[in-house]
Image (cartoon, rainbow, N blue to C red):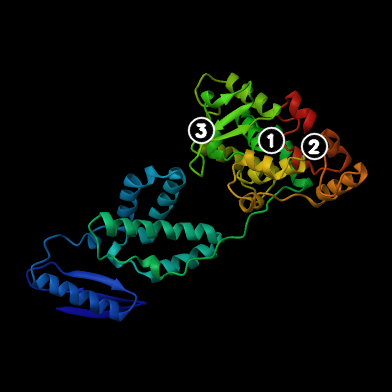
Amino acid sequence: MASIDKRGKVWRARVRIRGFAPKTRSFDTKAEAEQWAARIERQLLAGEDTCPDLASEMTLSEALERYAKEVTPTKKGAEQELRRIRAWQKRPLASLKLSLLTAAHFSEFKKERENEGKSANTIRLDLMLISAVFKKARKAWGMPYLKNPIAGVELPGGSKWRDRRLDEAEAQRFHRALAQQSDEMFKLIVTFALETAARLSEILRLRRTDLHVRRRIAILRDTKNGENRGVPLSKCAVEVVERALSLHDGERVFPMTRVQLYRSWRKLCDSARIENFRFHDLRHEATSRLLERGLTVMEVQRITGHKTLAMLLRYTQMYDNHVVARLDETEDSGAPSGWAPLESHGEEYGAAHQRPIATGLVSNVVMFPSCRRRL
């Protein structure tokens, strides 16, 4: 018969019928526990217990491992999700059976992550991974009665848009630290990211056959939005890829792994005494620089691949002094308000209007003539 008792914050239902293995599951409410126990009793007495209760046998860690093998490889962000799975498997919750996990467990996890200082978006992604595992178990792994505990957890709201750019002092330290890095390939990747606003995944996937140097175009394949994108290359970017290809005979332009790059990035930021600056922030930096150099919104959108103006604006943080300088230029030139010829934003712009050193992070680090002229 069934017994219902309260253990801490959860209600545990246990069904024992002679001739069958005991079945146990925990719930957030007593009513849910009673409903489950009644259903299991009916199934057992009707002889419907022909299959094992997989949810009572599989741990969260085992479910995550199966998900990592069957589902994760099909995703564009497979590498990042696999790291998230491995982090989950190290937590105590991973040792519990799926049938024992409740919303209370993951609400507590949410509080722990908040106390660790993790962003709302990081916590949300952690929880959504678990939700996806439970949905897969219900639909494809023979556990149709398994309740998704994340449905009872209040997910954190979206994180504030990042607007991280280096100030002048940080940029000077970044410049010096980057110049001292011994890994030339790493420095080339940083330079290319600043010149093209490309994502790290796009940079690392770039192959020799994707480069059209005479046309100064690089084809970024299988981008985040699922499409290929042609990116115009500055003279500096062309010199960067030519230098990178001269260092090896492989097919990939930048033969570096994420692990290697992140290790070098941490070393660089530690050496420069810079906190809360991620490699992806270079995309913000590069996008803002393109606008500060005088390119139109449509031209920048063509380079970055953003589908909408709203998404592009998320990656744009122009310094106030650049906007003021642009206003002065349009007035001095006699051009209509809001319009200025692109020629007016050449190399003199930076010298005349105190462009923050952050816009010239790679100056004198990768010593290419075209980079020096502009940076």
Please tell me the numbered disc located at residue 342: 2
Q: Do the CB atoms of the residues marked 3 and 2 lie less than 8 Å apart?
A: no
Give SS at disc 3: helix
Q: 201 or 105: which is nearer to us?
A: 201
Residue 24 image position (x, y, % from top left): 22, 70
Residue 58 image position (x, y, % from top left): 26, 57
From the viewer's perspective, tell me whether residue 373 is left or right of residue 91: right
Crowdedness near tag 2: few (<14), some (14–19) or many (≥20) residues, C-alpha within 10 Å: few
**Which image quadrant: the C terminus?**
top right
Q: Earlier in the sequence, mark 1 or mark 2?
A: 1
- Image-quadrant location for residue 41: bottom left
Q: Which residue is labeled 1 in the image?
A: 178
Up the image or down, 266 lies above or below 151; here it is: above
- Image-quadrant location for residue 229: top right
Give SS at disc 2: helix
Residue 200 image position (x, y, % from top left): 56, 39
Q: Earlier in the sequence, mark 3 or mark 2?
A: 3
Depth-wise, is mark 3 or mark 2 nearer the camera? 2
Depth-wise, is mark 1 or mark 2 nearer the camera? 2
Q: Of the residues shown, which amino acid type is indicated by label 1?
A: Leu
Please tell me the numbered disc located at residue 205: 3
Depth-wise, is mark 3 or mark 1 nearer the camera? 3
Label 1 to label 2: alpha-carbon separation: 31 Å
The residue under the point 69% across, 35% down is: 178
Up the image or down, 298 lies above or below 88; here it is: above
